[in-house]
Amino acid sequence: MSDGKRPRRVAEAIRKYIAEAFTREFFDPRLAGLMVTRVEVSADLSTARVHVRPAVPSADPAARREIEKAANRAAHTLRRALGAQLGLKKTPALTFFYDAGQDAIDRVEALLGEIEREGGLPK
């Protein structure tokens, strides 16, 4: 995506709006409690990649796909409302992705804890 100031400002505005919308405006239980971890906006402001994760992580890949599908179904509604909020000529197209970054961190910490319990790393 881009390193410019404007795309970063737009990305932050999108992140804040969507995070609030997930808590107030959607009645889909799959969207309740979703956190927006980051938003990447293209340099021309035409697309935005929105990374989300549930407040309570799930190890189930099917649940992750359901979260992505539910968020992407709400993308059109969010984009329309976001356009009015941001006042841009063209509102970025929203695409949602499950952010597995924290899951990877949790897995590494669990493995390190297991190694420590088993007597540590060999020297």
Image (cartoon, helix red, strand yellow):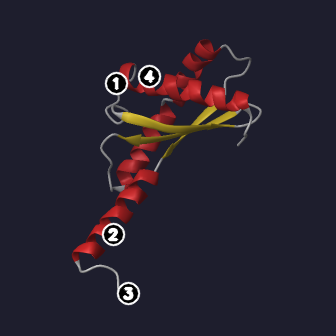
Q: Does residue 88 appear to the left or right of 18 in the view shown?
A: right
Kindly report the distance in space between the C-alpha atoms of the residues bearing marks 2 and 4.
37 Å
Q: Residues within 10 Å of mark 3 (few under 14, many from 20)?
A: few
Kindly report the distance in space between the C-alpha atoms of the residues bearing marks 4 and 1.
10 Å
Q: Position of residue 105 (x, y in %)?
A: 41, 58
Q: Position of residue 25 (x, y in %)?
A: 40, 19
**Numbered circle sitting on residue 21:** 4
Looking at the picture, does residue 37 appear above or below residue 116?
A: above
- Say which element carries label 2: helix
- Say which element carries label 1: loop
Dot 2 or dot 3: first in sequence order is 2
Dot 4 or dot 1: first in sequence order is 4
Question: What residue does disc 2 label?
Answer: 112
Which residue in the rendered view is the most extreme toward the bottom? 123
Q: Position of residue 16 (x, y in %)?
A: 50, 25
Q: Which amino acid is tagged 3?
A: Lys
Q: Which amino acid is tagged 4?
A: Ala
Kindly report the distance in space between the C-alpha atoms of the residues bearing marks 2 and 3.
15 Å
Q: Does residue 30 appear to the left or right of 94 in the view shown?
A: left
Q: Which amino acid is tagged 2?
A: Leu
Q: Position of residue 45 (x, y in %)?
A: 72, 30
Inspect this view and state whether residue 60 appears. Answer: yes
Which one is closest to the eye, mark 2 or mark 4?
Answer: 2
Dot 1 or dot 3: first in sequence order is 1
The structure residue drawn at horizontal position 35% and vertical position 36%, both measured from the top left corner, is 30
The structure residue drawn at horizontal position 41% and vertical position 36%, both measured from the top left corner, is 35
Which one is closest to the eye, mark 2 or mark 3?
Answer: 3
User: Does the CB distance between marks 2 and 1 fall below 8 Å?
Assistant: no
Kindly report the distance in space between the C-alpha atoms of the residues bearing marks 1 and 3.
54 Å
**Numbered circle sitting on residue 27:** 1
Question: What residue does disc 3 label?
Answer: 123
